[in-house]
Image (cartoon, rainbow, N blue to C red):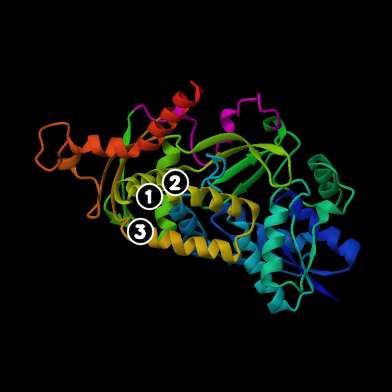
Amino acid sequence: MEKIVLAYSGGLDTSIIIPWLKENYGYEVIAMAADLGQGEELDPLNEKAIKSGASKIYIEDLKEAFVTEFIYPTLKAGAVYEGKYLLGTSFARPLIARKLVEIAEKEGAVAVAHGATGKGNDQVRFELAVKALNPDLKIIAPWRLWDIKSREDAIDYAQERGIPVPVSKDRPYSMDRNLWHLSHEGADLEDPWNEPKKDLYLLGVSPEDAPDQAEYVEINFDKGIPVAVNGEAYGPVQLLETLNALGGKHGVGIVDMVENRLVGMKSRGVYETPGGTILFTAHQALEHLTLDRLTLHYKEQIALKYAEMVYDGVWYSPLREALDAFVNVTQQNVTGTVQLKLYKGNCMLAGSKSPYSLYNEEFATFGRDGVYNQKDAEGFINLFGLPLKVRALMERKSGLR
């Protein structure tokens, strides 16, 4: 019997894929669950996967690799998709796919499978990663093949086979959770006019339910990498968990957006990214203090491309590696401390300092200084504005104005 390795979350889609693969292909199904910080969601997976028909299950602890190899490079790049989305699902997929390929090779499997729908971005992210890492593996995407057309159909399919699923027809949200974020899609959220219900949030509270007292937090960075919170050093996973709890307490990091999917349609998602929002805000503030104007402005262009590539699933590409090389050079002096004020969903800069700060109060002051000759500005303006002046003279001479 040939083997197939399934990227397994224990959710609705992957739970019914196990019997479907056995019924339609006759494969021995091996489940692989990636521990990216889902917490208690992973507890029942061993028993659940076997009861659903898998011959075995791997539960792989990938939390530290997730933070250091995927979150930190994206954070340093400043990559945000369409100005809002911090890419929590996007950069989890290439890591899951990498482990999927490793286990398929270890088990001698001929194929891998995933539960991404034919309408979404994840199918692209999973499959591009597999193609880049092992082009010989066959890829099966049941949502593009079976007769199930909706989440309600999938729930019925599961119930007919006695497979418990963590959703109901009363709360049929599609959710993806990891250390970085929690995403919500589907059901009443499919209408962009519908405000998210207050009980939707699981990583924190809605801003109006946050404490009435603001709280300050200090983040220390070393070459663009966060290393301490409020003066206490943490490892990568613990640091993010600490900031998630703090940000969630104050309703920080809730994003409601309609985004442009790679496959051509728009979709509405609600994201909770409390710790990630704190880190992005702090990192950006430190860059503004330590990067020169030319580098900062060019890096902003790089960030747009980086975000697009991560969103589109081309993580394993020469261009992404080349952009990382550029970004890492820019981060050499991004070291220092940022203080943020958290209040009712807001994450506001409250101070920044760095031994490599390019801010010089002697030059910037509105008071008396002895280092800047304001008369020099006249010559600069004359030269900088010369093309505009020449064009205006031409237009006047030629009768265009």
Residue nearest the observer in this picture, 21 or 269 = 269
Picture quarter containing residue 259?
top right
Q: Where residue 86 sits: x, y (%)?
A: 53, 46
Q: Where residue 17 sits: x, y (%)?
A: 80, 57
The disc placed on residue 275 is: 2
Residue 211 appears left or right of 270: left
Report the residue marked by disc 1.
294
Dots 1, 2 in contact, CB < 8 A? no
Q: Residues within 10 Å of mark 2 (few under 14, many from 20)?
A: many
**Magenta run includes residue 63:** no
Picture quarter containing residue 288?
top left
Q: Residues within 10 Å of mark 3 (few under 14, many from 20)?
A: some
Which residues fall within the magenta stretch? 190-212
Q: Secondary structure at mark 1?
A: helix
Q: Where residue 310 sits: x, y (%)?
A: 59, 54
Q: Where residue 55 sits: x, y (%)?
A: 76, 70
Dots 1, 3 in contact, CB < 8 A? no
Q: Mark 2: which amino acid?
A: Gly
Q: Mark 3: which amino acid?
A: Tyr
